[in-house]
């Protein structure tokens, strides 16, 4: 029996509401330039290359930054699902053994949108990686708290 698919993955979830239409929020989040805007400065994120300026299925993107540690690493990911108000990016190479990030956008009343992120991740290095899982989780949590504030600042300015 193949047990590689039954490995334990850590799951991170984050959601918040923005006072803006789902169309505007979707337009903002599917423009890859916004990734640099909503990412904390200390990560020093740089988009190296992308096969498209907007999120589309099959799109690949290469970024570099100080994702979890203070050491710069390169990350290559692919959009494996893209349909109205939902997309998924999966890391092909980078700091994690596995990284699958689902982005969902829910229209609440035409004037508000709930943004929901779910990340399934696994660190490399076996048992050693498991030791650092809590630290990685906290870093992801801090990043998404920043994303929330940056998104609200960008979309709720009138």
Image (spheres, grey):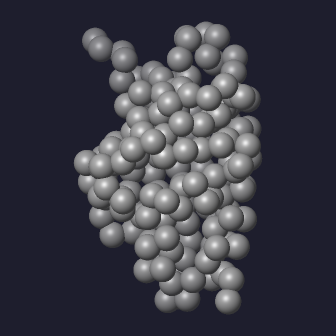
Task: Give the x, y percent position of residue 152.
Answer: 68, 72
Task: Give the x, y percent position of residue 79.
Answer: 34, 48
Q: Is residue 69 left or right of residue 51?
A: right
In the rendered image, the vertical position of residue 88 relative to residue 30, given as above or below: above
Q: Is residue 102 left or right of residue 140?
A: left
Say which quadrant the C terminus sits in.
Answer: bottom right
In the image, 86 versus 71, the foreground residue is: 71
Residue at 56%, 71% in the rendered image: 114
In the image, 84 versus 153, the foreground residue is: 153
In the rendered image, the vertical position of residue 149 relative to residue 75, given as above or below: below
The quadrant where residue 116 appears: bottom right
Say which quadrant the N terminus sits in.
Answer: top left
Number of marks in the rendered image: 0
In the rendered image, the vertical position of residue 153 relative to residue 1, given as above or below: below
Residue at 62%, 58% in the rendered image: 38
In the image, 125 versus 130, the foreground residue is: 125
Residue at 55%, 77% in the rendered image: 113
Residue 14 in view, yes or no: no
Residue 7 in view, yes or no: yes
Q: Is residue 2 left or right of residue 15?
A: left
Task: Give the x, y percent position of residue 134.
Answer: 71, 29
Task: Give the x, y percent position of residue 49.
Answer: 39, 44
Residue at 52%, 27% in the rendered image: 96
């Amino acid at each position: 029996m193949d047990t590689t698919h039954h490995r334990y993955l850590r799951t991170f979830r984050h959601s918040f509401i923005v006072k803006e239409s789902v169309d505007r929020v979707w337009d903002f989040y599917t423009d890859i330039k916004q990734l640099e805007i909503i990412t904390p400065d200390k990560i020093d994120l740089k988009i190296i290359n992308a096969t498209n300026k907007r999120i589309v299925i099959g799109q690949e993107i290469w970024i570099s930054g100080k994702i979890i540690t203070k050491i710069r690493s390169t990350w290559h990911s692919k959009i494996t699902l893209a349909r109205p108000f939902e997309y998924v990016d999966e890391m092909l190479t980078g700091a994690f053994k596995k990284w699958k990030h689902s982005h969902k956008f829910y229209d609440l009343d035409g004037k508000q949108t709930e943004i929901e992120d779910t990340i399934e991740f696994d660190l490399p290095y076996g048992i050693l990686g498991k030791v650092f899982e809590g630290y990685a989780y906290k870093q992801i949590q801090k990043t998404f708290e920043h994303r929330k504030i940056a998104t609200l600042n960008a979309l709720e300015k009138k």
